[in-house]
Structure formats: structure tokens, C-alpha cells
Amino acid sequence: MARNLDRDAKLGVLRLDDLTITRGDVADAIRAMPASFASLGSDGVYKHATEVLIRQKAMVLNARRQGLDKDPALLHRGEIALERIVADAWLARKANAAVTEEALHARYERDVAGKPGPDEARARVILVPTPDEARALIARLRAGADFAELALQHSKDPTASRGGDLGYVPLEAVSPEVGSAMFTLFPARSRRSRCTPWRGTTFRGSRDGGIAPLPASMKRVAGWSGIFGPTPSVQRFRR
């Protein structure tokens, strides 16, 4: 919805005295809403955004009547806020421009490549009420049943919708009981798959401590060097 409103961002939709609420204002208000507001539907989201903006504009009008828009302290705070916004925008633009494939690979080769990654285990789990049910499922798995389908049908774990897949997790990311079972079942750097019952839980997975992956934050980190440009002249005033 916000993208559609951006197409004619300067078009006014409401007016309070001399203050206009534009489609762009509504789009920005919608973007600032929590994701949970999507449950209101398009009409409800639009209505809520306009109500928020109307209240805000009404407060601005009241503040003007009291002369707050001419208060030197408030004006100074506004200048500082604007400087911060402009500086953040400049920094983001320079950082993005500085990030290249060459910079990424150079930083990866320097800091990551060849170094051991965290000790992690990847497992699929099927959580059922009793060990007997777990053993019965293992028998079906050994007979050729698909693990993901059995997890979807029988597992009480939150991962059931993903076929029981926990992904790669370090020991500290899971509960002590589950972690001790997983990391005992799958020795370090083991790639073999095993099905084992443990307190009503069926585990299948592997363990790895191989090459560390390229961190998601590396793209931004790789571009920090040299983005600040020339140092501006500084004139110091006596305190």
C-alpha cells in the first residue's frame, strides 16, 4: 500500500488549516506501523495512519498558537536532529558505495577464510509424547518413510511445519537437555545421518565445525575503511 501512495506522494489527501497531509505522509506513517497492524486490512491501515497524522497536525497547530514553533531551544533541537539525519544518510550512501565484490572477498580472505567456524549441529527433530512413539517413528524411517512428512504429521515441536529442521545450531542455542543429546549423538565433524530416540524425541542430523560462513554484517564492515572522505577544516573557539 505504501508503494502505491508513493506514486503521487505530494498529492494532498487532508488539510487542517494551512497544514496538508499528503499521500507521501500517509505512506511514511504506514511504514512506521508495527507489522501486526497488517491484520487491520488495507482500509483499516489507511484509516489508522490518517488518524495518527491528524492528531499530529492538530498538536502542531496548538503548539504554534502557543508560540512553541519560535522557541529558540526547540529550534536548536530541530537543527541538531536534522544534522543527525543528514549525517546518517551521507554515511549510509558512502558505505554502500564503498562495498564492492572485491572489498567483500578481500575482507573475507583476511578475516574468515580458512578459519574454523563454530561447532554446530544440524538436526531434524520429531517431538512426540513418549519414547515408544519415537521408536515407532524410527522404525518407519528405517523402512523408508520421509522424515519431513512424519515431522509435519506427528511432531509437537514448533519446527514441525519446517519438516522438523532446526538448521545449524550451536550448543548454547538449545536447551541443555536437547543440546547434550544432539552433541553426543553426532560426534565432531560427523557428516553421517543417524536416527535416535531420546525422551520421546527423534533426532536425525550431523555436526560440523568447518569453514566459517561469510557473516551477514560483513557487507557493511567491508566498506567502513576510507568512507569518511577529506577531513573538514576545524576552527576552535575559546571556552
Image: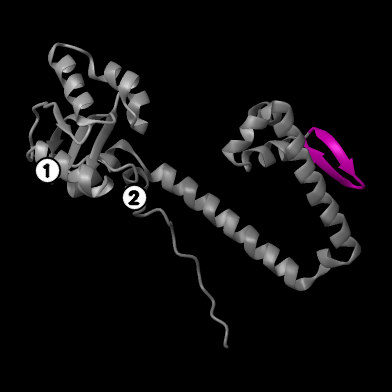
- Viewer-proximal residue among 150 and 131: 131
Q: Amino acid at mark 2?
A: Val
Is the residue 71 above or below the residue 85 in the image?
below
CA gap, disc 2 to disc 1? 19 Å
Residue 234, given in percent of the width and then of the height, sits at 51, 73
> If you read the primary sequence from the N terminus, does the residue marked by circle 2 or circle 1 appear first?
1
Q: Determine whether the residue tagged by mark 2 lies in a helix, strand or loop.
A: helix
Q: Residue furthest bottom?
A: 239
Residue 2 visible here: no
Residue that mark 1 sits on: 114
What secondary structure characterizes most of the magenta part? strand
Residue 147, given in percent of the width and then of the height, sits at 23, 19
Which image quarter holds the N terminus? top right
Please indicate whether residue 159 sits to the left or right of residue 48 in the image. left
Q: Amino acid at mark 1?
A: Gly
Which image quarter holds the C terminus? bottom right
Please indicate whether residue 61 sits to the left or right of residue 208 in the image. right
Rate crowding at label 1 as few (under 14), some (14 to 19) or many (20 or more) other CA atoms within 10 Å.
few
Residue that mark 2 sits on: 221
Q: Which quadrant of the view contains residue 194?
A: top left
Rate crowding at label 2 as few (under 14), some (14 to 19) or many (20 or more) other CA atoms within 10 Å.
some
Q: Residue at x 68, y 36 (%)?
A: 27
Please indicate whether residue 48 sits to the left or right of residue 203 in the image. right
Q: Which quadrant of the view contains residue 41?
A: top right
Q: Residue at x 28, y 29 (%)?
A: 128
Q: Residue furthest top?
A: 144
Please indicate whether residue 37 sits to the left or right of residue 167 in the image. right
Report the span colored magenta: 11-22
Q: Residue at x 29, y 22 (%)?
A: 151
The answer to whether mark 2 and mark 1 are in CB contact below 8 A is: no
